Amino acid sequence: MKLMKPFMLSVLVAATLSSCGGGADIVSTPVENIDSVALKVSELTENEKQTWGHLDLVKDTIPGMSVEKTYAEIIKNKKGQSVIVAVIDSGIDIEHEDLNGVLWTNKKEIPGNGIDDDKNGYVDDIYGWNFLGDAYDEQLEYVRILAKGDTTDPQYAEAQAEYDKEYQETVGRKAQYDQIYEQVKSADDVIAKFIGKEDYTKEDVQAIETEDESVTKAMGVLNFMYGNGFDDTKVALKSIKEGVDYFTDKLNYNLNKDFNGRTTGDNPDDLSDVGYGNNNVMPSEKGESHGTHVAGIIAAERGNGKGADGVANNVQIMSLRAVPNGDEYDKDIALAIRYAVDNGASIINGSFGKYYSTHSDWVRDAIKYASDNDVIFVNAAGNEGIDLDQKECYPNDQVNNGPEVSTTFITVGALEPKYGANMVAGFSNYGKINVDVLAPGAKIYSTTPENEYDTKGGTSMAAPAVAGVAALIRSYYPKLSGAQVKQIIMDSGLALSTKVVVGGDTEDVRPIGELSKSSKIVNAYNALIMADQLSK
């Protein structure tokens, strides 16, 4: 499942590092203590909101990755090599104005001739491959387990308990969102009519003086909404409607045991049954925006004056449509990983995940295949605010916190754009063993279908930020191995001692360093300094 849910109501401390895979000692740039940075008091400007993941903690007092500083002071006019980044996700709008110039194309394939020219098993795979065919809506994995009816499955009992709990909760949440939406929509209609305009402001509402009971009641609803973080009624309605749609889809498709979204004609339990799907990597509908958003975070064309800039230049995005509106099939993911490796990708971004898996070994074998072929896999940690050292999440590169099968698998948790106690996103999963680093993931502005842009949040957005940093390193320091790039990203981050709220629970406050293996937040500036030294 895409790791995103609706939401409602530069510098490095001086250190000597010797764990970059090549055996060389790396001395970072000596600087002042990061934790002396003052908290940002003022609200973020519109530009800061749209670019915060690229900003610098010391200069801007925002916990970004120092991307702009990296271009200004390190990259400057350097020419790097082109890097292929495979995005395994929902469909990507390859016609988007900010993405159409950064696409990977299969030069070995002749477009539209209906022949597998390069004999890789995929016909006319010009921009990648679509493993979902014409489908998009899907069940969750544990619902598929129940639908099969095999009570001897070791996951069956747990899946049944999960289903009973989740179904009732979802019914309740949908009813709640329906009610809230109707209340706010009704209040919006009343206030718009009273004021005489649709685009009224919070200040307009608070300036109303009337004894009309229907208007005062509507004011109460909107003022309550304003007090819960929404300053614009139309934005609030859009957000609430997303919640309504999310829970409606969840009941109709994700939790529906009688629904079968698979239309490709293959057997999803047979890894040798291949060749299914098609070459159309575009979204099936405008609302299928996740993959487009992720691709933009990595590689939206920089400096073209359009909506967003990606983290990395010199990137070619390979589009692999394999993540539906529901849980992905292990078979699709395993084959997509192998496609990426076999067709030249040096980095794979995986902004998806689930907590049940019937063929996790297929995916783990593919992750090892990527590692064995020097391909980096950047993985989103998940959005349930839980400790991944205590609960298995798929995909992963180990079993039960055991030995890792990959030296290039990076799991990423998410940061908020506010330095301090609430810096770690409340939704972000964490883990001292199973989450490697933290990176900007909440409130990220990027590309969406049909030449549009939007702000979305999740570890889904943090992973491509790190994939972008990996692409920068591989572009400008191509001799470094994937394992070295991973270690650079982990070792070069900012080591903070800030105490933060964990999992959105204000009763759970810990040093931020306890939430990931590296104890650091990703920093592109320091990563390139370290890459430069290691490459020498």
Image (tube, rainbow, N blue to C red):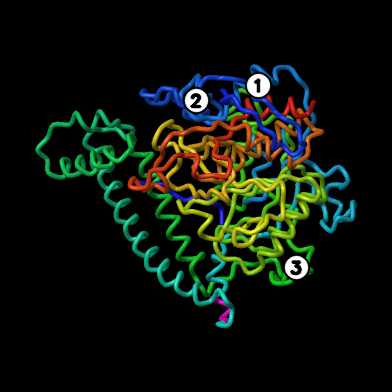
* Crowd class of label 1 (few under 14; some 14 to 19; many from 20; radius 10 Å): some
- Chain part drawn in magenta: 146-150
Residue 79 image-quadrant placement = top right
> The residue tagged with tag 3: helix, strand or loop?
loop
Whole-number angstrom distance, CA of label 1 to CA of label 3: 43 Å
The verdict on residue 129 being magenta is: no
Q: Earlier in the sequence, mark 3 or mark 2?
A: 2
> The residue tagged with tag 2: helix, strand or loop?
helix
Residue corresponding to mark 3: 271
Does residue 285 lie above or below 14 as drawn?
Answer: below
State left or right for residue 249 relative to residue 222.
right
Depth order, front residue of 237/162 = 162
x and y, in percent, of residue 69 in the image: 60, 20
x and y, in percent, of residue 264 in the image: 70, 66
> The residue tagged with tag 1: helix, strand or loop?
helix
The verdict on residue 149 being magenta is: yes
Task: Give, as a three-letter code, the residue at label 2.
Answer: Ile
Q: Can residue 296 be seen by looking at this rendering?
A: no
Q: Can residue 69 be seen by looking at this rendering?
A: yes
Whole-number angstrom distance, CA of label 2 to CA of label 1: 21 Å
Depth order, front residue of 103/11 = 11
Q: Main secondary structure of the magenta part?
A: helix
Labels 3 & 2 near each other (Cβ < 8 A)? no
Residue corresponding to mark 2: 34
Residue corresponding to mark 1: 71
Residue displayed at 64% across by 63% down: 329
